Image: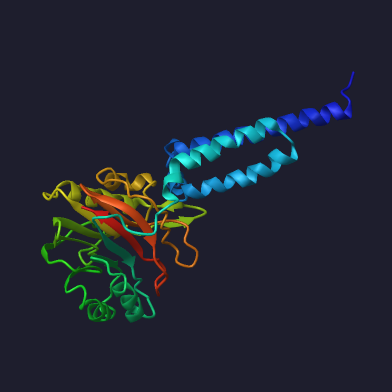
Amino acid sequence: MTKKPDARKRGWSRRRGRAVALLCLLVAVLLVRPGLVPNTPGRVGSLLETFLPWLGLAVPVLLVPALLRRSFLASAALLLPVAAWSVSFGGLVSTGDRPAEGTFTVVQHNVSDVNPDPAATARALAGTDAGLIALEELTATALPAFEAALAADHPHHATRGTVGLWSKYPLSDVRLVDIRPSGVGEGWNRGLRATARTPRGEVAVYVAHLPSVRIGPATGLTSGRRDESAVLLAEAIAAEPLERVILLGDLNGTLDDRGLEPVGSLMSRPGPGFAFSWPAGFPVARIDQVLARSATVTRVRSLPATGSDHLPVAADIKV
């Protein structure tokens, strides 16, 4: 005996409902354990981790077939990715309006080596009242504009290659940090270290610009040089004799990206705030980072756009 059309329709609907429920389970697992996705080929795992918060958009997408099929199983299963996203990223939603007591502000910004108006960018950064300002992609032609705009409130500064640090506090023990991946020549200088004598004691401040990554349909995410440079940076921080460390930099990756684990494992996770910083036109990821050791980054936020393809990132730090 053949099944009646209504019975066949109900069976098809149940199967669709189970499929939606399985997709909900998969999304929840990936949100909590993205490391289960292998990094080969094409560093797919790192690519997923870079944009991991956006995986939550799967919830409204999956809600549509769940409602259309009137599937209780699928609708209930939607609670899994909602809960997983809340556990992973819910704490980043609220940043508060005021800095916590006993903190000072720092700013991290890749100012872009093709910035059409570095002087305007410098003035915008001068208005942040940050104690420390770290910059990347400084060019020889743009450097005077930043020196002029920041000198009044940040009389202490140091540059090495294309990275720089401006400070309200005296700086000493400034040196180059060599984070060149293999095969890169000596002219590639994108790391520095300085001791800042803050009102709360000495802090080692690192400024770094890790190599860029590329995303392509054939190659996936190419981050080998970035990952190698991250290991070198982590080795420098691990050998730092000062207990308190602040790292500011364009790390060309999010903290969920396993390629930055060597650095991230040495530092405490920052406080609330998504602070997406790239690309400036429609920010989808925070690749500009402010991290600390033996100190607390209490909140992070992105600032208004300048002439760069990155947004500035401000953070409050409690030493």
Where 3 sits versus 206, above or below? above
> Is 242 above or below relative to 155?
above
| Quadrant (top left/top right/bottom left/bottom right) for the N terminus | top right
**Coordinates of residue 318 in the picture (x, y in percent):** 24, 53
Residue beneath the point at 59% across and 44% down:
59
Q: Is residue 182 visible?
A: no
Indicate left or right for 4 with 58 as reference: right
| Residue nearest the observer in this picture, 250 or 73 | 73
Q: Position of residue 302 (x, y in %)?
A: 39, 62
**Which quadrant would residue 24 be assigned to in this image?**
top right
Q: Nearer the viewer, residue 3 or 147?
A: 147
Position in image of residue 101 (x %, y %) = 27, 55
Is 219 placed left or right of 299 in the picture?
Answer: right
Instruction: Please tell me which residue is depicted at 20% across the width and 47% down the height of the picture.
Output: 294
Q: Check the image and name the residue furthest to the top.
A: 1
Picture coordinates of residue 118 (x, y %)? 33, 78
Front position in the image: 272 or 185? 272
At 45% from the left edge and 51% from the top edge, which residue is drawn?
A: 93
In this view of the protein, which residue sits in the foreground, 311 or 37?
311
**Residue 133 appears left or right of 12:** left
Instruction: Identify the image's colour scheme: rainbow, by chain, secondary structure or one colour.
Output: rainbow
Residue at 47% from the left image edge and 61% from the top image edge: 283
Residue 274 visible in the current orientation = yes
Relative to 297, 56 lies left or right:
right
Q: How many marks?
A: 0
